[in-house]
Amino acid sequence: MDRYLSFSQYLKNTFHRRLYKVSLNAHMTCPNRDGTCGDRGCIFCSAAGSGDFAISFNGEALKREDLVFNHQKCDDGFIAYFQSFTNTYAPIEKLERIYRAALENELFAGISIATRPDCMQQEVIDLLVHLQKEYPSKFIWVELGLQTIHEKTALWMRRGYPLSVFDHCTDRLHEAGFPVIVHVIIGLPGENEEMLYQTIEYLNSRHIEGIKLQLLHYLKDSDLGQEYLAHPDRYHPLEIDEYIDLVCGCIARLDPSIVIHRISGDGNKGELLAPLWSMDKRNVINQINHALKEKNIVQGCMIK
């Protein structure tokens, strides 16, 4: 029994084959790092801008041997995932060049663009509309780093924009016909389970298409990691049982039509300070699936 709409199940239903996300670093920065709204990034963000494992990409023609790993079959397809930093934060000419290069590559079934809601200007949306018409057989997704709906937490993490900006951005993307995938962090200091579930319920009301549930990582090369090293008594990295309970609670409250792209996170093991149990991703996913079965939880079963 499928207890939630996983990313792998969605791909199987939609494309009838495996597709692997390939993380790309298009060498952009972020308004939260270049002084526009901050210069140190979000408090949890690593020096690599969440792109520790990304392949450098400037629009060159990537070949299968550049992308294939041992666990992938020769006939598998790929998704070009623009991951590092803010991937709409560049001159429009550069954005068109790199998006077009990925869309033209026969290895990629489509592209997924990770960005910030305050960096989704109309000219970028217009570009995506144009490219979608030019490449109708390919898909274009937009991923937005929201993390939480609560303004107090957003100020603590130095997110740099209010919830209203996220709302306006999702409205415009939906009007233009683009699916929206939202990143949410579990285990944010100062947030209890009720606050987390309020974020999930709010996203239901925004009719998003996908979600990533991410454990808060304490990384050496982030400001949060340095604060944790200096004052470990001030922070509570989640234990695995706590995280599993919260993920189950999120799934129970999430609209069944929303694709769950992730229920755990990949951190740079050389930089991870806590929680160390998260390094065994397979074990975490297995325990979540076991807990869903034991609690008889299916996606959306607790929606009021």
Image: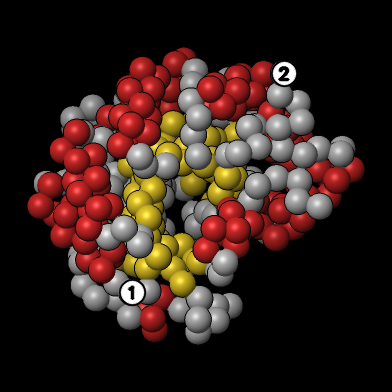
Q: Specify the label residue 304 is tagged with.
A: 2
Residue 156 percent across, percent down from the top left:
44, 22
Q: Is residue 237 above or below residue 94?
A: above
Q: Residue at x 31, y 47 (%)?
A: 85
Q: Amino acid under label 2?
A: Lys
> At numbered mark 2, what does the secondary structure look like: helix, strand or loop?
loop
The front one of 227 and 205 is 205
Give the left or right position of residue 271, taking residue 198 as reference: left
Q: Nearer the viewer, residue 297 or 222?
A: 297
Quote the CA–CA distance across marks 1 and 2.
Answer: 44 Å
Crowding at label 2, few (<14), some or many (≥20) Cα neighbours within 10 Å? Answer: few
Q: Is residue 86 above or below residue 84?
A: above
Question: What residue would you read off at disc 1?
Answer: 106
Q: Amino acid at mark 1?
A: Glu
Asked which secondary structure carries label 1, the reply is loop
Badge 1: how crowded within 10 Å, few (<14), some, or many (20+)?
some
At horizontal 38% and vertical 81% (from top left) the residue drawn is 64
Seen from the viewer's position, the closer of residues 204 and 28 is: 204
Q: Is residue 301 visible?
A: yes
- The quarter of the picture where the C terminus appears is top right
Residue 189 visible, this orientation: no
Q: Position of residue 247 (x, y in %)?
A: 69, 38
Residue 294 numbered mark, or none: none
| Spot occupied by residue 26 in the image (x, y as percentages of width and height) | 25, 58
Q: Is residue 50 left or right of residue 270?
A: left
